[in-house]
Image (tube, helix red, strand yellow):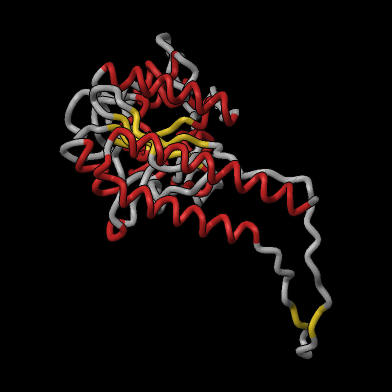
Amino acid sequence: MKKQYLLLLIAALIFSACSSKKQIVKTNSAYDATNKIYTGHADTLSQMLLATNPAMLVDSLGRPVPSEFIGTVNFNLRKPNYVIIHYTAQDSVPQTLRTFTVTRTQVSAHYVIGKDGKVIHMLNDYMRAWHAGVSKWGNVTDMNSSSIGIELDNKGNEPFSQPQINSLLLLLAKLKKDYNIPRANFIGHGDIAPGRKPDPGIRFPWEQLANRGFGFYSDMLIVPAPANFDSTTALRLIGYDTSNLPAAIGAFKRHFVQREDSIRFTQFDLDVLYNVYQKY
């Protein structure tokens, strides 16, 4: 009976992965080989999940410690708790798909959204994509293991199209509902990797997202920060890694001020920070 529970769980995951594969195959046969590799890799991972080997332990004298595997029936898949938004910094969706479907790049994302609003699902949401890289948010140092990565087709120096943002908002609503992702946990790549990554950049409409319940943004009327306001602590409470303080300041300003890309706080910036950190 316990094995049946596990088999049903694995079957559900593989069916979900393969259903995405079938949809892509119907629309673009050029990716047949990629989808076969995807399914094969998912099958390999499913076999790892089905393994029931007990822990092989020895004591300080080299004697084996008695152990066995008894499967619990109370479990499910790990769920994502963050959404990280990126821009592709590439010339087109086909170029991005190429980047994400060759092994030498070692990068991927769960979703890619084109300028025309088309959404391409590239990885089952429960699986771990390689999109965050070296990053940190609060106490989380492995963002890939707890997040969904969304790439927007954008070079980084251009406005985002409204069809693209409309599709993003629909996708975020689905993800928030499906996985009960907290409002504060919709953030950008630049937030979790300050000094290393700037995306989605100062042109991204964070305020529009916040108005729909995805992340926070400053209010129109901003209360001035008090004279003794500790900006470093405020950044850390929001989630920023302040070990490189200038980089953290720059990341905050790209997200919440969106007027300039600099590493120093003006008084207006401090007022915005004071307003924002009280929401967290």
Instruction: Answer with left or right where residue 159 lies relative to residue 213.
Output: left
Outermost residue to the top:
221
Q: Position of residue 133 (x, y in %)?
A: 39, 52
- Above or below 57: residue 144: above
Q: Is residue 159 above or below residue 77?
A: above
Q: Which residue: 65% across, 63% down?
A: 51
**Left or right: 35, with 70 as reference point:** left
Task: Reply above or below: 98 against 56.
Answer: above
Assign the C terminus to one quadrant of the image.
Answer: top right
**Residue 236 percent across, percent down from the top left:** 50, 39
In the rendered image, is residue 110 in sight?
Answer: no
Towards the viewer: 84 or 198: 84
Q: How many marks?
A: 0
Q: Residue at x 40, y 22 (%)?
A: 272
Q: Residue at x 49, y 29 (%)?
A: 229
Most distant residue in the right direction: 66
Determine which quarter of the picture holds residue 79: top right
Q: Quadrant of residue 209?
A: top left
Is 235 on the left-hand or right-hand side of 3? left
Please name whichever residue, 179 or 73, is drawn nearer the observer in this view of the structure. 73
User: Is 97 situated left or right of 79 in this image?
Assistant: left
Outermost residue, bottom direction? 61
Residue 204 visible here: yes
Question: Whole-percent x and y of residue 182?
Answer: 57, 28
Task: Tell me the residue at 51%/36% (across/down).
Answer: 82
